[in-house]
Amino acid sequence: MAKADFYEMLGVSRTATDAELKASFRKLAMQCHPDRNPGDTAAEIRFKEINEAYQCLSDGQKRAAYDRFGHAAFENGSAGPGGMGDGFASSMSDIFDDLFGDMMGGGRRGRANGRERGNDLRYNLEITLEDAFKGKTATIKVPSLMTCEACTGSGAKPGSKPKACTTCGGAGRVRAQQGFFAIERTCPTCQGRGEMIDNPCDACRGAGRVTRERSLSVNIPPGVEDGTRIRLAGEGESGLRGGPAGDLYIFLSMKAHPFFQRDGADLFCRVPISMVQAALGGEFTVHTVDGSEAKVKVPEGTQSGKQFKLKGKGMPVLRSREFGDLYIQANVETPQNLTKRQRELLSEFETESSNKTHPESSGFFTRMKEFLTGAQ
């Protein structure tokens, strides 16, 4: 029975580039891999066939010979793509390291000499609206794992050194031969570190790190909002055995302000004004978030809920020179605890009032009566 064409087997044309060959092989190999098809004999055969095809076509010299002579180029005992020479398992392992690194536990991206990157840390920092307006430098205390000073992070007692793992020889990974290909896994003895510690450090008990509280300065720029994240590179946990440190992420939250509510760069404030001031007009003074004062003119006949806009008196926009606005909402206050004379005056005013003095309420009740009468 004639062997199938290698190009057809991989689903590529004869002019396919190395990248196209590799991409097609990766896709097919992932589909037919024995680990994904346990007990499927057909998938195993298919997997071997596409390996054979890729072994040939990914080698420039073998591909040239195949293009000229076909399968005959590797007959008569020559070291063709299907031959099981001494370098076959090694070459196949290199391919699997490249293509199946994630599925096989990380491939060759293991932790060299046991060095591991430290974990990232999170710190929640609450600030005031004034802090967010002006910006500030805050000092925080962060408990984290730091490199042990006694053993300088090695985990071994001073005067001694870690030894190479006898199982993996210091590689951190072990190879297991399964059929015609090899699979690498994390060394079970040293857990991928590549080292063993016979005399652990007394200070850190062999971990190479100890818990310490550090004081750090954090620069908070003007204009930050609730939920803003600040990253301090390399200020997280120290890495294991000399590995790089992680990062520290600071998440900002805003304390509730007694007078201002914030929406982006704009601020909102409710100001109570007297009924007389609302009716006759006038002005009042408000304090802004930057500490200055601003006067607000109240026109005659101001209704409760009316907003006055103070342009540029809001929050700064992060990393720009722009500012939001401050919106003042008038809240007309109904007088309480009236004296006898005040009650008499208000009664006189009510008696003499007309639709002109209360156009909204008069019009409202008239429209409501007309609507309900018409609906009946």
Image: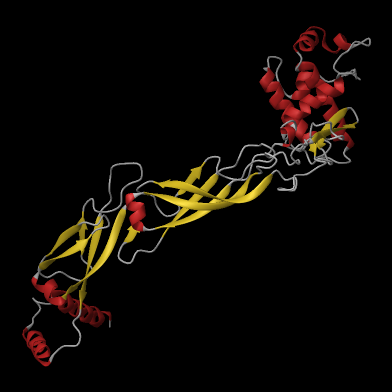
Q: Percent position (x, y) of residue 336?
A: 20, 85
Give the quarter of the image for residue 322: top left
Residue 289's place in the image compared with 87, above or below, is below
Q: Percent position (x, y) of residue 266?
A: 30, 54
Residue 264 in sight from this viewpoint? no
Residue closest to the eye, 70 or 369: 70
Residue 87's place in the image compared with 305, above or below, is above
Q: Residue at coordinates 62% horizontally, 37% vertically from top-left?
A: 244
Q: Percent position (x, y) of residue 71?
A: 85, 13
Residue closest to the eye, 234 or 340: 234
Give the quarter of the image for residue 26: top right
Q: Percent position (x, y) of residue 344?
A: 9, 90
Q: How many marks?
A: 0
Q: Residue at coordinates 78% horizontally, 29% vertically from top-left?
A: 96
Residue 67's place in the image compared with 304, above or below, is above
Residue sticking out furthest to the front: 159
Placement of the C terminus among the 4 image quadrants: bottom left
305 left or right of 255 in image: left
Q: How is the image coloured?
A: secondary structure
Residue 134's place in the image compared with 93, above or below, is below
Residue sticking out furthest to the right: 76
Give the quarter of the image for residue 197: top right
Placement of the N terminus among the 4 image quadrants: top right
Residue 87 in sight from this viewpoint? yes
Residue sticking out furthest to the bottom: 340
